[in-house]
Image (cartoon, grey):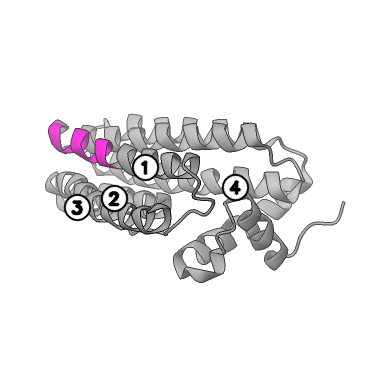
Amino acid sequence: MSQLDRDGYFDAWSDLHGGYDPRGSSLVRSWLSVAYALARPLARTGVAPDVVTAIGVLVSACAAALAAGDGAAWLVGAALAVLLSGLLDNLDGAVAVLTGRATRWGHVLDSLADRVSDLLYLVALWLAGAQPAVCVVAGTLMFLQEYARARAAAGGMTEIGVVTVWERPTRVIVTAAFLASGAALGDLWPELGAGVWVALGVVGLVQLLRTVRRRLG
């Protein structure tokens, strides 16, 4: 079976995401380009996309466990695990598209896995020194954004709507960056990372709701 080229992959991804063209956002385009490049050899092995999804969640759990360790090396390990889990989160969908095994069930499973991983990122920040209350607020804002997007789709909005400042790639990068900073600069940085989650969570939710209101009236 011949594999799609990158533009073909973008088109297939767009079909699965309500017609949103990933070429319109440099962040999404770059993120998906990396996933495409890494997924091509993985797809040739015949690995099931659901297996990649499960491994991604396990790696997120490892990030939280590493963040509980005592010492800078543990936080560096946690940061690397967050980055790896974020990469795996994109590889499962890319493998599904490249192998022609993208399904609606896989989309639901991937969304659930994303939310579990998001929560595990916050657990990692908490174990690294962030205040529990701040992490709870951050998680609530994340869930509100994703719930609003899901309800908008149920209400008839066929497109993603808008790529906000607070999508999965940004959450991965922010979490990894502040865990690594905690290793180098002290315990204050994981707490600042949770604060960034809250600030960007507010902005992202507002961006999404404005678009949903405009589209759905």
| First along the sequence among labels 4 and 2 | 4
For label 3, the SS is helix
Identify the mark at residue 148; answer none if there is no mark: 1
Place residue 214 in its image quadrant.
bottom left
Tag 1 or tag 2, which sits nearer the N-term? 1
With respect to residue 118, does 214 lie above or below? below
Residue in view at x 72 percent, y 37 percent: 47
Front of the two marks 4 and 2: 2
Counting residues from the start of the chain, the first of labels 1 and 3 encountered is 1
Q: The residue under label 2 is which amino acid type?
A: Leu
Q: For the residues marked 4 and 3, what is the alpha-carbon distance in whole angstroms?
A: 28 Å
Mark 4 or 1, nearer chain start? 4
In this rendering, which labeled residue sits more in front, label 4 or label 1? Answer: 1
**Residue marked by disc 4:** 91
The amino acid on which the numbered mark 1 sits, given as a three-letter code, is Ala
Around disc 2, counting alpha carbons within 10 Å, would you say few (fewer than 14), some (14 to 19), or many (20 or more)? many
Q: Are marks 4 and 3 in contact (CB under 8 Å)?
A: no
Residue on which the image places disc 3: 199
Residue 187 rendering spot, x and y as whole percentages: 14, 44
Pointer 3 and pointer 2: residues touching (CB < 8 Å)? no
In x, y percent, where is residue 53?
A: 57, 35
* Residue 208 in the image, given as x and y percentages of width and height: 34, 54
Q: Nearer the viewer, residue 173 or 94?
A: 94
**Image coordinates for residue 55, horizontal then vertical, percent:** 55, 33
Provide the residue designation for mark 2.
205
The image quadrant of residue 134 is: top left
Residue drawn at (54%, 51%), measured in percent from left and top? 158
Q: Mark 3, residues whose alpha carbon is within 10 Å: few (<14), some, or many (≥20)?
A: some
Q: CA distance from mark 1 to mark 3?
A: 18 Å
Q: Secondary structure at mark 2?
A: helix
Q: Which residues are magenta?
A: 133-141
